[in-house]
Amino acid sequence: MKKVIVIVGPTGSGKTSLSIRLAKKINAEIINGDSVQVYQGLDIGSAKIKENEKENIPHHLFDIVKPGKPYSVYNFQKDVRKKINQIKVPMIVGGTGLYIKAALYQYEFIEKGRSQDFDDQYSSYSNEELYQMLIDLDPDVVIDIQNRRRILRALEQAVLGHPRSSKTKKDNLLYNPLIIYLDLDRNLQEERLKKRLERQLEEGFIEEVIKLDQQNIRINAIGYRELNQYLDGIITLDEAKELIIKASKRLAKKQKTFFKNQMSPVMLDALSPSLEDDTYRIIKAFLKED
């Protein structure tokens, strides 16, 4: 299987700068693994790498979608696999766990989500009746009988010939990945998040949100969401900052759990003085393996 290097970690862990230094050493090309950085114009709020920081390293899947246009994990999965197969030494850098997993594993997605027509068709049935229909079509499915939304989605998938249990069985790796997680102490992370946010505000984060709003575009992502509330007069700027930090910390905790439980990453201290040397040594050994 083709080898893929993956650098992940929370906001503010230094993924971008480390990936540039490593890519230069191993002649890698960088693929975006962040769900927000695929969008054009979402630069400051997503901490997207600047052109002058790329140091002639090829970067892929950045700025490929206009803001406001739909771009799902299904779209990303198709695009990222093309890039992985085209690039000699691919390095995915980002923090969106589901996007990373969709790239590497034999995940199957249905292009369109659950339709309202389908919901309406089964609106008169109880959860128990829906569950029985689902079990008849997909006997191996495991699902919470109290969660009507999930039952309906699983039932629609089964009706369309894509039973959910078959996706679980096919949850196998398509590539041979080395996943490196840059870990940050939670207290240090908060400190870094605050400094990073102040820097983003100085660089024009609010102006970026205003520009999007003038195009009738509202981004439901951390930072953009809270600053829109501030600009709408719902909260103060200080309250927006506090909410951004809290949301960033919650997301970091959630993503760390996701990566640890589902992808067995190599955990490295993001602030270790020997981080670059340690990571390079691990990658070098990985690339030499048969």
Image: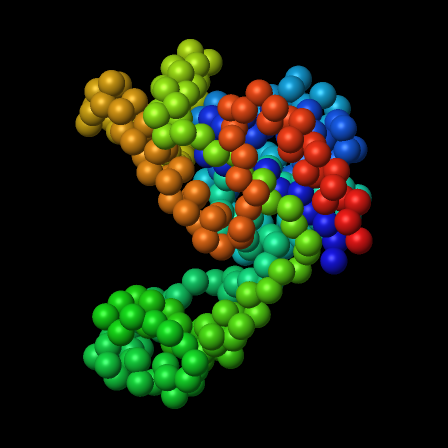
Q: Position of residue 10 (x, y in %)?
A: 46, 34
Name the residue at the bottom extreme: 136
Q: Position of residue 122 (x, y in %)?
A: 29, 78
Q: Is residue 214 left or right of residue 274?
A: left
Q: Position of residue 2 (x, y in %)?
A: 74, 53
* Residue 144 visible to the viewer: yes
- Residue at x 60%, y 45% (from the top left corner): 179
Answer above or below: position of 88 versus 115.
above
Q: Is residue 202 above or below residue 2?
A: above
Does the image show residue 117?
A: no
What residue do we see at 37% from left, 20% from top? 191
What kind of colouring is applied to the model shown? rainbow
Query: In the image, is 281 to the left or to the right of 250?
Result: right
- Horizontal relation, residue 65 to residue 156: left or right: right
Q: Position of residue 272 (x, y in %)?
A: 54, 24
Which of the two residues, 241 or 205, is positioned nearer the viewer here? Answer: 241
Residue 50, above or below 128: above
Location of residue 249 (image quadrant): top left
Q: Which quadrant of the rendered structure holds the N terminus? A: bottom right
Residue drawn at the location 47% of the way across and 26% of the way down: 12
Q: Is residue 166 positioned above or below 289 on the image?
A: below
Most foreground residue, 138 or 210:
138
